Image: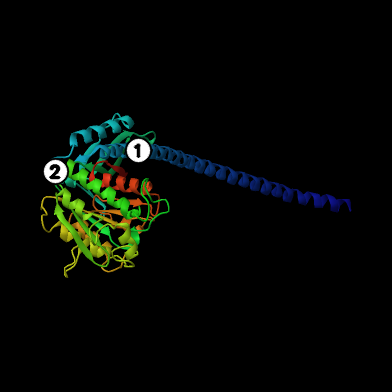
Amino acid sequence: MWRNVRSHSRHDVPSRAASLRRKRAARAHRLGRRSRRTGTVLILVAILMIVFVAMAAFAIDLGVRVQHRAALQKAVDAAALAGVGVLERNGFAANEHLTRAVVGQYFAQNQPALTPEVELGRWNRITRTFTPNVTSPLAINAVRVQAAWQYDSLFGKALGAATYRSTAESVAIGGRDVGGPRDIVLLIDQTAALLTPHPDAYAPGEQAPHDYPLNAKRALREAALTFIDDTLADFPDDQIAVSGFAEHTEVELALTRNSAALHGAFDIDRPGAFIYAHAEYQAQSGGRYPGAIPRLGLALDGDSEGQMGGRQIAVGVNARHDAKKMLILVSTGDTDPQPDPQAIVAQLAADGFDVYTITTGAPSALMRSLAVGDGRNYVVPAPAAYATMLAAFHEAFDRIGGRQPTHPKLVK
């Protein structure tokens, strides 16, 4: 029995040695695999670190470019608004020298090391395009300022970009007319819309019903007469016409510089007056065409059946081919859809007309859309206190006529 045990142990020694060798080999294999994996990870980490650093550098440089671009845009915006704020135009020349000087001054306050490019020209609000070097000074209504800024990159050099270049452009419209020739047509709604009186609509010393009510049309009359007097006094080359409209249009007065005739168009004492006395206002229940729906398209354009619209008046009797054509439309914005006023003003703009709109009552999207060329839309709250309506009409006419500069506005 002892011999058998010893014999078994003797035969088992090589087997255990082999097992140990296999275990050692397996352990070495595992260690080798771990070593290889560790090496691979280190290589990947090194590559990713390079990528992360490059991305961080790119992000920093991108932030720098965004900051520089924003600063440059701020500079051209401020310069364009300042330049157009002093822009004046007349029949002989625009004040280009002063406009450029102001642009340079305001730009230098933001970017003293750069020099902008400054152009005076015309902004077309239909096509939203700027045309520099227009022939007529009266056509100038915009200032464009452009600038470029080249600066060193922070980390871009490692990627082959030693410098960056940012550009900015701004176009502002505004300014004022300081002379003619201008052919100006007042197109005034004759429906009941402008005749709604207000409870406190009587001036000191007036007693209703003996005097006519102070309403939107009364305030319009007083502001329009002031506009006529100021224009004829200050701008000797300008002419003014007056037209009323509702379902139809009627020329109250063709283009003229005759102050007495223009005042006569607004005379409240004549029969069938354009602006009514209180008795006639009561008799007609409001308006020359009570209950009528005005046709704004007809008022702006006219037709082939003898209806004289603003276009026909502005190019008709006494019109000048070299004059700036201005149509001033006063209405609430209610309209019969035929003819389409928006299609007509698009053609008027293409033909070089400027259409200004004065909305009485609540703001009107349609009236805003009808202001083209140099035109802006102005709002007169109605019904309201007489002083409120009169002040709003005066401001509108002062800006349209050029006595006050139009508020500068960025359009690009």
- Residue 14 is situated, as x and y percent measured from the top left of the image, at 72, 49
Q: Residue at x 69, y 49 (%)?
A: 18
Q: Earlier in the sequence, mark 2 or mark 1?
A: 1
Instruction: Name the residue tied to disc 2.
Output: 236
Farthest residue toward the bottom? 305
Task: Give the amino acid type for the residue marked by disc 1 in the picture.
Answer: Lys
Task: Give the amino acid type for the residue marked by disc 2 in the picture.
Answer: Pro
Secondary structure of residue under mark 1? helix
Of badges 2 and 1, the one in the foreground is 2
Instruction: Name the residue tied to disc 1.
Output: 74
- Residue 290 is situated, as x and y percent measured from the top left of the image, at 32, 66
Secondary structure of residue under mark 2? loop
292 relative position to 32: left or right = left
| Camera sees residue 306 | yes
User: Of residues 239 and 37, which is closer to you in this image?
Assistant: 239
CA–CA distance in space, label 2 to label 1: 40 Å
User: Of residues 187 and 38, which is closer to you in this image?
Assistant: 187
User: Of residues 109 and 69, which is closer to you in this image?
Assistant: 109
362 relative position to 7: left or right = left
User: Of residues 27 and 334, which is closer to you in this image?
Assistant: 334
Q: Residue at x 48, y 42 (%)?
A: 48
Q: Residue at x 29, y 37 (%)?
A: 82
Q: Residue at x 16, y 52 (%)?
A: 261
- Residue 369 is situated, as x and y percent measured from the top left of the image, at 31, 57
